[in-house]
Amino acid sequence: MAIVYEKQGQGEHVFTLHTEHSTYQMKVDGHGYLLHLYYGGKVSGCMDYLLTYYDRGFSGNPAAAGLDRTYSLDTLPQEYPALGTGDFRSSALAVCNGDGSQCCDLKYAGHEVRKGKYGLKGLPAVYAEQGEAETLEIRLRDRVSGVEVALLYGVLEGEDIITRSAVIKNGAGTGITVEKALSGCLDFVAGEYDLIGFHGRHAMERNFQRTAIVHGNQVIGSRRGTSSHQYNPAVIVAEKGAGEDNGSCYGMMFVYSGNFMCEAEMDQFGQTRVMMGLQSEYFRYPLEPGEELVLPEVILGHTDRGLGKLSRMFHGLIRNHICRGKYAGQARPVLLNSWEAAYFDFNADTIVRLAESAAQLGIDMVVMDDGWFGKREDDNSGLGDWQVNERKLGCTLGEMIERVNGCGVKFGIWVEPEMVSEDSDLYREHPDWALKVPGREPVRGRNQLVLDFSREDVREFIFDRICSVLEQGNIEYLKWDMNRSLADVYSARSVQGKVTYDYMVGLYDFLEKLTAKYPDLLIEGCSGGGGRFDAGMLYYTPQIWCSDNTDAVDRLRIQYGTSFLYPISAVGSHVSAVPNHQTGRMTSLHTRGVVAMAGTFGYELDPGKLTDREKEEVKEQVARFKGYADLVREGDYYRLSDPFRDSCGAWMFVSRDGAKALVNVVMLEVHGNMPVTYVRLKGLKPEAVYEDAESRRRYSGAALMNAGLPMPLRMGEYPAYQMELNEVRLS
């Protein structure tokens, strides 16, 4: 059994969660408090011997402890610490009661173990078949205020994953306000740890950053209404010295696409607490008697085999238990996007010419990006007016799609449903539909405002308009964009303090209905590229445009950071023109292709501007990627270098049976008379013999992993290498 319950004497209860290689344990003690005992490598027996009790100066003692000064919640590890109980460390829950007091003294009130994985009303969450998971629900209650908290634990034993969520219910006779609500907490009684996070900015997302967890609070998060380019809602807690292939690592990933926070704190006694959940700024959630607040889920994973193993655990979980629908486990079309090919300057003939070129090159789909609707000749107008501009196209959308399909190419389209331009018919008719603070001029981003998706009437109107577009022809792909942050957090219809949460629940409701109505539609998420790259969006969109920056060298670093927690199958990555439109950098078509193949693969250029030789190279790239598509999508991913520090960016894919591998290397430094770079491979069978598909040279798996491969010294900037290795079946 994945969940083991043991009742001990004097009202004590022990709950143990086992995965294939890890154990998570907690205990209700004799005072009714739920204490955290252990999370780490798999163990047996009760771990309550790790708890220590001393009289600590200025650490308060709860009334339940009587005169025992050695018992303090300020020093004990807890599952769900709340404000106002004598624990002066950061809390997961802060409640303002009806009388204005801030206290929530949660004690055990019951539990339930059930087969299958719990779901969350209105929110995305990890899913599993009945036999793949078990659920533990522990109910806590404050007997004075009546506030109730149901802690939810999902155990996916075979995936080595545990999920956490909570449902907060007002069981009192008066209204309360939830002022802080985090979904998961990890308390470590000993050890030194680093916090690994992924910071960035628009066009340079998810840069790897590793810092020591020291005394005091480290907080990352987003107040932008999205998970953001600046910080990703996923972190790794790594023991000192843990590396790519060794050491204890804990992953925490928030299944949510809006405001979030992660707090890491070392306390006065060297204990470490790491928590993740909703951002407390812009958040004051009132609950009337009987009402509930469902918190988004946190995914937890542990391994003692280093960062690489943790990454592969999360990759498998997202592919198989987050992404849904037709394309969750299916090859994605290689596509050509019109944005960097034409920007706003196009008509139907332009798109058809792109389709003709795509067909000649073996590309599967053409996507018409921004500029096809309303009065939209630039990014200053038209958002919200989701009517096809037939005058601009020169025909109906349906007629254009028929012409594109007639070339043997699929068709996709871009939308930005959450936004509205002030210069639009929609805004002129419904100015109250935008998020704005009364009496103030709005804060603009990209010269646009945000529609109030916390309102059902707004969502329904936009939903009908988007569906009316999708019904006009054979549209097989939708790029869902979102190009600004939420600044004017005020809704004319919602209770203030609930707006950012209700906005996200509204967005999820929209996407749930859209995916249900169009189950064969491939949706790619986007928010200025990677500004909303998170597990919450992957529940609805199995791929996300990784970054608006298509420069191959920058993408090496962006995709490196992304790979720590998100699978390659979710990474939208394209070959673009040179000089690159974001950096002006020149890289070879071959290098751009190698980098983009670490993703869903496609093109962001005008094929008509390519030379005949370049067109032949694109044909070869497309054919090669299609041959590798299953390996890239489903194979185990290994980082072979750190492109922030090393002279090359290197990574590889290995089939689950270890029989096939694809090695990729991009040289970042080229010097006169430079030393040879050796790249050590990973994930191969040590005893096997592998053959290079191009040179037919053979190597032992052990040699490739222990000694590595020398990279050829080649002239020119950023040369790239790609090697296919196949196991030789020796008689």
Image (cartoon, grey):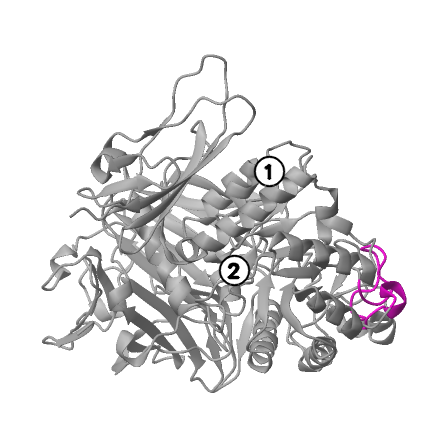
Callout 2: 10 Å neighbours few (<14), some, many (20+)? many
- Residue 630: image location, x then y, percent: 42, 58
Q: Give the range drawn in magenta.
A: 372-394
Q: Which amino acid does label 2 sit on?
A: Gln
| Left or right relative to 457: residue 20 | left
- Residue 652: image location, x then y, percent: 38, 44
Q: Mark 1 points at which residue?
A: 589
The image quarter in which residue 474 lies: bottom right
| Residue at 38 percent of width and 24 percent of height | 677
The image quarter in which residue 398 lies: bottom right
| Residue at 75 percent of width and 66 percent of height | 436
Measured in 3D between alpha carbons, the distance from the residue under mark 2 to the one under mark 1, in whole angstroms, is 43 Å
| Residue closest to the far front | 731
- Dominant SS of magenta comes to loop
Q: Is 374 part of what is drawn in magenta?
A: yes
Closest to the observer: 317 or 120?
317
Q: Which mark is residue 279?
A: 2
Of the image marks 2 and 1, the number of the one nearer the N terminus: 2
Secondary structure under tag 1 reads: helix
Closest to the observer: 192 or 664?
664
Q: Is 89 part of what is drawn in magenta?
A: no
Closest to the observer: 520 or 14?
520
Q: Residue 650 carries which label?
A: none
